[in-house]
Amino acid sequence: MTTWLANTIGTPVECLKIGSEMEYMIWARQVMHAHGVTPILKDWTGDQPAAYVNDGRWAARCLMDTNTCIAHPGGSAEWPNPVAVCAECGTVYRPVFPANRELAEIVLLARPDVRQRHWFGDRDETPERLGHLIVENAENKWPKRRAIPSSGEVV
């Protein structure tokens, strides 16, 4: 079992060891340069993708090339806005996080294996409701446990 995301749903902070939105942009440019792509980032101005959880990480789908981008919900000085950057094409997104994000994190953190922490929320035409995750947890007898959502508040 992966233990590095045992107590949190990952963001660029945990997954990439990046401390701010600015560092995330620098990281994306470095990756692009290493892959021979001109390291120019461009803001996406259309409808923003929905954030979802994949293998215990917040993510957003790149609308240019369908890559998965690690997402951050924002809300702090270092991460003022939601953000996801495609390190393949350089598109910067402001993903839409679900209103019940912290509750979803609590439900997903009850799952002992990070590889079982998936929630597609409003990403697709057929949204996956939070109640579905709760039923899956009960069916699999995953324990109810105290969890610490990204806000840091113990629930």
Image (cartoon, rainbow, N blue to C red):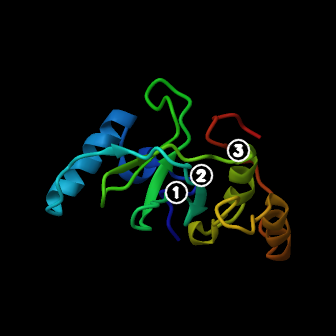
Nearest the camera: 32 or 155? 32
Q: Earlier in the sequence, mark 2 or mark 3?
A: 2
Check the image and name the residue furthest to the top: 77
- Specify the amino acid type for callout 3: Glu
Q: Quadrant of the C terminus?
A: top right
Distance Cα–Cα, label 1 vs label 3: 15 Å
Residue 132, image quadrant: bottom right
For the point 57% across and 57% down, the residue is 6
Query: In this figure, which residue is indicated by the disc labeled 2?
Result: 7
Nearest the camera: 13 or 63? 63
Query: In this figure, which residue is indicated by the disc labeled 1?
Result: 59
Residue 129, percent from left and from top = 80, 61
Q: Nearer the viewer, mark 2 or mark 3?
A: 3
- Specify the amino acid type for callout 1: Ala
Residue 5, percent from left and from top = 52, 56
Nearest the camera: 108 or 3? 108
Distance Cα–Cα, label 2 vs label 1: 17 Å
Q: Is residue 68 left or right of residue 103?
A: left
In the image, which disc is placed on residue 102? 3
For the point 17% across and 53% down, the residue is 38
Q: Secondary structure at mark 3?
A: helix
Q: Is residue 117 left or right of residue 36?
A: right
Residue 1, percent from left and from top = 53, 71
- Specify the amino acid type for callout 2: Asn
Q: Earlier in the sequence, mark 2 or mark 1?
A: 2
Distance Cα–Cα, label 2 vs label 3: 13 Å
For the point 75% across and 65% down, the residue is 128
Q: Secondary structure at mark 2?
A: loop
